[in-house]
Amino acid sequence: MTPLSQLPIDVVVMAAGKGTRMKSRLPKVLQRLAGVPLVQHVLNTAAQLNARSAVVITGHGADQVEPLLLAPGQAMAVQCVRQEPQLGTGHAVQQAVPALADDGVVVVLSGDVPLTQADTLQALIEQCGGKQLALLTIDFADPTGYGRIVREGTQVQAIVEHKDATEAQRQIQEVYSGIMAVPAHLLKGWLGRIDNQNAQGEYYLTDVVKLAVADGLPVVAHKIADPLQVAGINSPVQLAELERAHQLRQAQRLMEQGVRLKDPARFDLRGQLDCAQDVEIDVNCIFEGQVSLGEGVKIGANCVIANCTIEAGAVIHPFTHIDGEKLGVTVGEGALIGPFARLRPGAQLGAEVHIGNFVEVKNSTLAKGAKANHLAYLGDATVGERVNYGAGSITANYDGANKHRTVIEADVHIGSNCVLVAPVTIGAGGTVGGGSTITKSTEPGALSVARGKQVSIANWARPKKQPKA
Ligand code: UD1
Ligand code: CA
């Protein structure tokens, strides 16, 4: 017999349903939880299982769903199969049959159940063992609407849908999660035999249970206790509830690693956050994409931080927005950023850099100890060590067609309200007088002033208002 760990796994994701209660133009499985489309969560989990293939059943909104699934960089090879019209979950899985090999274990998942963990599915697959039907089940205090697990003694006999259930069956609290693991060859045989003679006139996937029992094959239930792992999304309220529950879990995981969150209920992570020791995060911060925080980093309240590396001891003051997008952002050791700062893609800040309020930095390198403390723009600039960049100064990096670089060498002092028209280099140790528009490169050590000369007229009388005629 094939060892369990070598059983090929093929995942089938049902994602054809309408999602009427979302009341959205966006198909339900593309709604986002923690910043990621619901169906993408499911595929990420499938990838963790090292599944051989994934077949996604699309229908409603297929034109929008399929491009995401087939996009390059997808976690695993995905095949899309359309189900039109949608005649039930059994009919949905029937559409996948031609795409499924006979030798595998099929794991059936739903595109709107995002938080199932790979280890749970692994345990379910072990229960299946490549030889029998295994159902993921859970006890609900209020099982209304779910398919009930009907047992005789301990043996599972059937799943009865709520609408088809007798009063006595409706008392059963153990429900089917919508997730099963089943040998492909058995599933294929049963799918050919299900009908739609039920309260909803649908082909129920859940009818495979009674067919297995009729064939004298065992059906096992793998019961879990964690409702988040089987929670499906049908409405904006459920989406928001699951988002909060998921965020709280992520917050708890970080706190267990030692991260000090001021309030785990006011924390959002939409991606991956790696934290060294003694990181402190104040309330209402959002982290997106890949973020890494070095030892002792402090993040003030109300920051949005995405795709960024912040090195040890740096402090990000409140209301700072950082998004490295594809280029990334680096904040060096002991740097002070904000409040109200904006760091855009390609901002590479060295150690002890200071970026103050209403300062925007894009695609620029600032060496150790450089400072831009107030109301300034640095775009496509290379800034040397200890440069002081005055309030209100900007790099004019765009000539309307092309972008050009500004080089500010070490120890330069740029006064307030300067315009540095790129391409231009300010030589080391130089000074630029406030209000200057610099269009030519300057020599090291030079003072450059490029503005109208001040004229003062002594005892000047202001014009007086003429009396009305
Ligand atoms: C299903 C189960 C029920 C279980 C519940 C758990 C059946 C018959 N019932 O019920 O036992 O307790 O899930 O949530 O399976 N879908 C399609 N094509 C279709 C119909 C549905 O792709 O023709 C997709 C939906 O988009 C959804 C999933 O299948 O992702 C489940 O469908 P849904 O209508 O939510 O099933 P339930 O009636 O909730
Ligand atoms: Ca459902």
Image: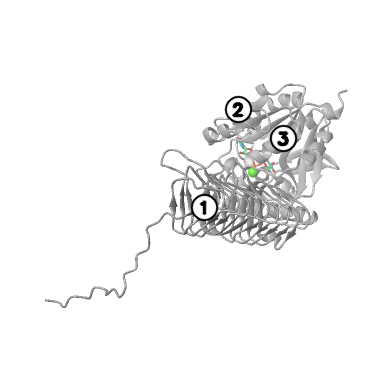
**417 with respect to 150 (left or right):** left
Whether residue 132 is visible to the viewer of this picture, yes or no, is yes
Coordinates of residue 431 in the picture (x, y in percent): 52, 55
Q: How crowded is mark 2: few (under 14 residues within 10 Å), some or many (20 or more)?
A: many
Q: Residue at the spot x=64%, y=39% of the render?
A: 40
Viewer-side label of 2, 3: 3
Q: Which of 19 and 46 is in front in this view?
A: 46
The kind of secondary structure element at disc 1 is loop
Q: Residue at the spot x=32%, y=73% of the render?
A: 458
Mark sitting earlier along the chain (1/3) = 3
Q: How far is the residue under mark 1 from the one under mark 3?
A: 63 Å
On the image, numbered disc 3 is attached to which residue?
46
The kind of secondary structure element at disc 3 is helix
Q: How far is the residue under mark 1 from the one under mark 2?
A: 70 Å
As drawn, the residue found furthest toward the bottom would be: 467
Q: Residues within 10 Å of mark 1 (few under 14, many from 20)?
A: some
**26 with respect to 98 (left or right):** left
The quarter of the displayed image where residue 45 is located: top right
The kind of secondary structure element at disc 2 is strand
In the displayed structure, 192 sits above or below 449; it is: above
Mark sitting earlier along the chain (1/2) = 2
Q: Nearer the viewer, residue 37 or 395?
A: 395
Coordinates of residue 78 in the picture (x, y in percent): 65, 29
Q: In which quarter of the image is ligand 2?
A: top right
On the image, numbered disc 1 is attached to which residue?
446
Viewer-side label of 1, 3: 1
